Image (cartoon, grey):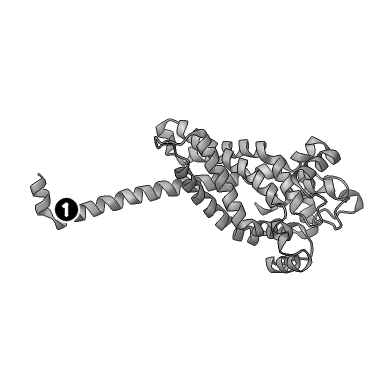
Amino acid sequence: MVWLYRLHLYPSMSCCMDDLDHDTHGVRAGQQSAKKAIGFIEAIMLIGKEEGVKGYWKGNLPQVIRIVPYSAVQLFAYETYKKLFRGEDGQLSVLGRLGAGACAGMTSTLITYPLDVLRLRLAVEPGYRTMSQVALNMLREEGLASFYNGLGPSLLSIAPYIAINFCVFDLVKKSLPEKYQKKTQSSLLTAVVAAAIATGTCYPLDTIRRQMQLKGTPYKSVFDAFSGIIEREGVIGLYRGFVPNALKSMPNSSIKLTTFDIVKKLIAASEKEFQRIADDNRKKANPNTTDVQT
């Protein structure tokens, strides 16, 4: 999935090439190509030509290092926030699900954000081989604050994305007939639909986030980036790279939510089985108590 992540960066970065004081890795196919947006297929060919097959997996280790704690915190936080947002009747409303998802997304992003910045820099900037090289260079040249460049847009983009994604997944899954709710195929398809809706709705904010994370970005705020992108490329500029992004995020989200759903079911079944075994052992240890109750 890392190569898809890099591909969806290529088109979105070109809108501010003239303002950035460096060439972004992969968009160095000459002066002409550096000044215009390149397409999905062109980006695939460019990575393969300049870096070989290994280029499609550049930055994979930082992605793995980041995604494990990010997903763990996000899913755990979502279940925790759902308990907090339940009404007095114990039910969770649509607004409650949206609120729980938004808070979970912001919590996981805030905790793992420096890893996200390092992953992006390692994937698109030339000359770096490891996360430690990127981190030391950022500290030396840009200071500690550079690890949180674009945090505001990231929180603004992830909150509605996770809110919509998780809420749609829960509601659609809940609306299915009971015989389908327990099937893995249902979870996969439901998660794909939820991710598609969330991605289409929140993609412009993700474009702004990526622009503000890059070194030398000319944008100082969300509104500055929003107006700057529209001025240079029009509204379509906010959706550049949408296809590779969707190809990355939809299966990613589907696998994550489906796996989490399966694990929750396994844990619930294990707890039920453990309770049954504990009750049986208790009865065997105290047969007289059982006879008296009978």
Residue 133, above or below 164? below
Up/down of 93 relative to 109, above or below: above
Q: Residue furthest front?
A: 88
Q: Residue at x 49, y 48 (%)?
A: 259
Q: Looking at the picture, how far across and down is residue 144, in whole percent?
A: 71, 64
Q: Provide the secondary structure element on which disc 1 rests.
A: helix
Amino acid type of the residue that numbered disc 1 sits on in the rendered structure: Lys
Question: Can you give x and y, in whole percent of width and height, for residue 2 in the image?
Answer: 67, 54
When asked about the image quadrant of residue 284, the answer is: bottom left
Q: What residue would you read off at disc 1?
A: 283
Please name the residue shown 40% across and 33% down the image: 179
Q: Is residue 169 visible?
A: no
Relative image position of residue 142 (x, y in whole percent): 77, 63
Q: Measuring 43% from the left and 30% from the top, which residue is drawn there?
A: 177
| Quadrant of image for the C terminus | top left
User: Where 107 sits versus 61, above or below?
Assistant: above
Q: For residue 62, say whether it is visible.
A: yes
Q: In the rendered view, does 124 fall on the left or right side of 269?
A: right
